[in-house]
Image (cartoon, helix red, strand yellow):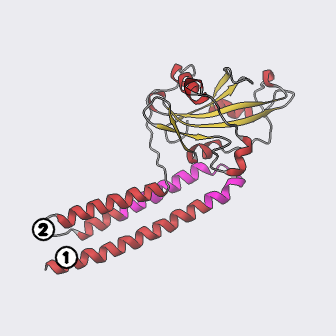
Amino acid sequence: MIDSGLDEIVLLFEDDLSAVASQWRYSDFELLLDGSVLLEQFAASQVKAVYVSVGNKLAVQSLVFFLLKIDENGLATQKFNVPLRYLSSQAGLGPDLGSGQRVRVASRKNCPVPWHSKHLWEPRGVGDLHPAKRIQKLVWRNSLGLSERKMVASADLNASSLQQLQSSLEDRLQATLNASGSVDVRSLIEQHNQQLQQLATRFEFELAQQQEGHADTLRQQQEELQKLRSALRQEKGRSRRLQQLLRGDTQSEK
């Protein structure tokens, strides 16, 4: 189980996608990658597999449709280096599978890291026949005995997070300026700076989880960190400007 509280499982499909051939908790799947487990029924083939993160009430949170090569002895290829967790966290939004929220989906046509797209596959199907729908129904049957209640505390640290922070600040600022009485400049600035620090802390935590030794993703992670730092600098500049604005208003009231 990852630190956010989500359960992780891996499903292996039959060659014709007619059914799920086997399902694994992620810790057991890692044994397969280490060569401790054989998949003789898939020997000398390329298996269509899916990484699934599962949240509260067994609701699927994200899906990564990836390919897994098995050699003639039933061993998983030792060259497997697809960053499943990273792709899961960065994937774009897909359909609502019945839980009331859209899931994240990484596939060949929708891969957040382009050079990994060749290791993914594209699910096809309409309505309940789509692999994602079938996966959610399978997870709800819960044959792996997953916990149905989890403490999930994760955040998407991207541009929308900063926009939400900015919108929240502007709402509080407007409410404060419209209220009768004095403006508590110190309190407002402290709240804003605290939010900035929390945002930076959450980003560092997410980044630490994503850095799993995959050298081919390190460059993109560094670019994302640089973008966030730039955005934080802009927000701090905004905080300083707000401080000057509020101090000007308090002086005019006097």
User: What secondary structure is found at the residue carrying circle 1?
Assistant: helix
Q: Quadrant of residue 21?
A: top right
Q: Determine the residue positioned at 50% across, 30% down.
A: 97
- Residue 107, compared with residue 131, is above or below; it is below
The span shown in magenta is 193-222
Q: Could you give the CA–CA distance between mark 2 and mark 1, rounded to whole angstroms?
A: 10 Å
Residue type at numbered disc 1: Thr
Q: Position of residue 133 (x, y in %)?
A: 55, 27
User: What secondary structure is found at the residue carrying circle 2?
Assistant: loop
Q: Determine the residue positioned at 46% across, 48% down.
A: 155
Q: Position of residue 92 (x, y in %)?
A: 55, 45
Q: Residue furthest right?
A: 72
Question: For mark 2, what is the residue?
Answer: 181
Q: Is residue 116 left or right of residue 231?
A: right
Q: Which secondary structure is most common in the magenta stretch? A: helix
Q: Quadrant of the C terminus?
A: bottom left
